[in-house]
Amino acid sequence: MLAALPPPADAADQPAAPDTALLRVAFGVLQKHKTDSGADQYVLVDSEGKVHYAIPPSDGVPLEANVGKSVQIVGALNSHPTSEQPLLVAQTIEPKIAPPAQFADPQSLPPLMPIPSPESAGSGTTGTAPRVILEGEVIDESLLNGQEFLESTEPEPLLPAPDPWHHAPCGPPERLWGQVSALAWWTREMALPPLVTTSPPGTPQAQAGVMGAAGTQVLFGDGDVFTDLRYGMQFRVGGWLGPRRWVGLEFDYTGLQDEQTQFLAVSVGDQILARPFLNVGPNTLAFDSALVAYPNLLAGTVLIDVDSEFQSAGFHLVTNLLCTFGSQHSARRELGGCSSGFRLDLLGGYRYIGLNESVTIRDYLVTTITPRTGLVGFDQFSTGNDFHGGELGLAAKYQRRRWWTEGLFRVALGRTQETIAIRGETQVIVPPDAQNGPGTLLAGGILAQTTNIGDHSYKASAWAPEIGLTCGYELTPQLSVKLGYSLLFLSNVIRPAGAIDLGVNETYIPDPTDPNLVPVGPARPAVAFNDTNYWAQGFQLGLDYRW
């Protein structure tokens, strides 16, 4: 807001003094901005961040030492046609905690004390002394008629003394910041091969559960899992390294709840249950199946667990590239706080992404004919992906009063350590009085055999871009509520579905009747590294607090 005072009554008949003879007292925060030509320029801004005066350097006036501070400047107005703001040639500058709290109608103010100009003081001659306008943060020539005055309904409380942390020409007011968000994200689904099948009653044993045979239906697999919404949390903490707040450090962590899909099928022999595979044994190349339940032969159960765990973490150096914020100064916000404007920061650092998943298949079956024999099969495929890379990105923020919007784009380049752990075994359980004891443990199940069991690893080059858009609203000068959207992508990962080889040489499947059977033919199933990509995306709702 602006105010001005008319000349004293005894000078009514004298000609109006030029602008250069009119001294002003202006209150605001002194800043140093860049002009269009790239040169530094001192400016005086008000509590709304609006620039009202350009302050040219003056001999004996310590402008640089007062950058970022709330000041009172006494100077002469010097309008210049090439300047966007009026030039205020400073004669004195001193710290000022707050401008006057109340402004009155200029007509009701007492007469002002004239301050002699340097010319008149030196010559000793009388003349028109420059007038000093005492009230107001900034001065508007349109108000010199005295018909308008500043509107103020209540005084604004005084602020504490300036904090040296807040001397940045365009830095945010906080020293430290922290954010916590609740996530509702989707992740890329995993396409499983057919793992459990069934056939109509009366299907011949050789065709029961065989893919492609008449009436065969897939009970589990041959479709996508992990299609549901997943919840999680995200944390970000950081701080500036110096009082000017141009360079800082930030750490972030994102974690989603473990996703689990489970399948269970039980049959006492009335329903056919089977484990399908592609038989690549000697002189054989056809779809086949291992029976789990079949009428008058087997009763059994199949239990499958599919798990997924995802997390990401990063550590970055943050530095400012571009800023058009004005510095706000009022009792509702710390000195030096940013009001309306735009800010662009460069991010550089380290990114970690972890994706761990598994498919575990257990089948329990028992013969319904004599001799009674039980079998417990176990196949497990566990994959791990650990991405490590250097990350570079940009973060942009636009603020308008209490509302703000923040955009993020960053890309990490590095390598993914892919691991596959395959386990498989079959336990043969016979009656306790049997000659060979209570049970025998054989290596291999159905899809996990001695040909692929073990730990395997591989390193793949990968890249991981991330984008985000967040909108926030300041509940207090320190606390904001925010809502945003994020998308994270990782180019190369191995998933359990890509590690399963459905091609099985039937001679490697454990035979309870001949545990010493020597396999012949192709060494299948094999270790499979079928890479794919992965993404996680969704919404976040959280709080942003700044100290």
Image: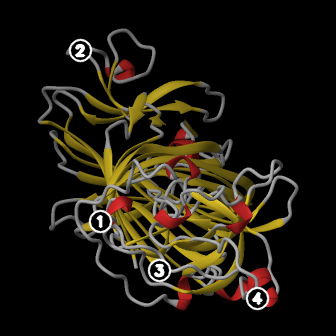
Give the Cα distance between marks 2 and 4: 120 Å
Q: Which residue carries the number 4 mark?
A: 124
Q: Quadrant of residue 326?
A: bottom right
Helix, strand or loop under label 4: loop
Q: Which residue carries the number 3 mark?
A: 176
- Residue contact at pointers 2 and 3, CB within 8 angstroms: no
In the depicted structure, whether residue 78 falls above or below residue 337:
above
Q: Quadrant of residue 161?
A: bottom left
Give the Cα distance between marks 2 and 3: 67 Å
Residue type at numbered disc 3: Leu
Helix, strand or loop under label 1: loop
Identify the residue at image location x=42%, y=73%. Answer: 111
Helix, strand or loop under label 3: strand
Disc number lying in front (2 or 4): 4
Instruction: Check disc 4: other Cα within 10 Å, few if <14, some if 14-19, many if 20+.
Output: few
Give how far across and how far down residue 185 sits, in percent. 38, 45
The earlier-in-sequence mark between 4 and 1 is 4
Disc number lying in front (1 or 2): 1
Disc number lying in front (2 or 3): 3
Name the mark on residue 476: 1
Image quadrant in which the C terminus is located: bottom left
Identify the residue at image location x=44%, y=84%. Answer: 97
Instruction: Check disc 1: other Cα within 10 Å, few if <14, some if 14-19, many if 20+.
Output: few
Q: Is residue 330 visible?
A: yes
Q: Nearer the viewer, residue 82 or 412?
A: 82
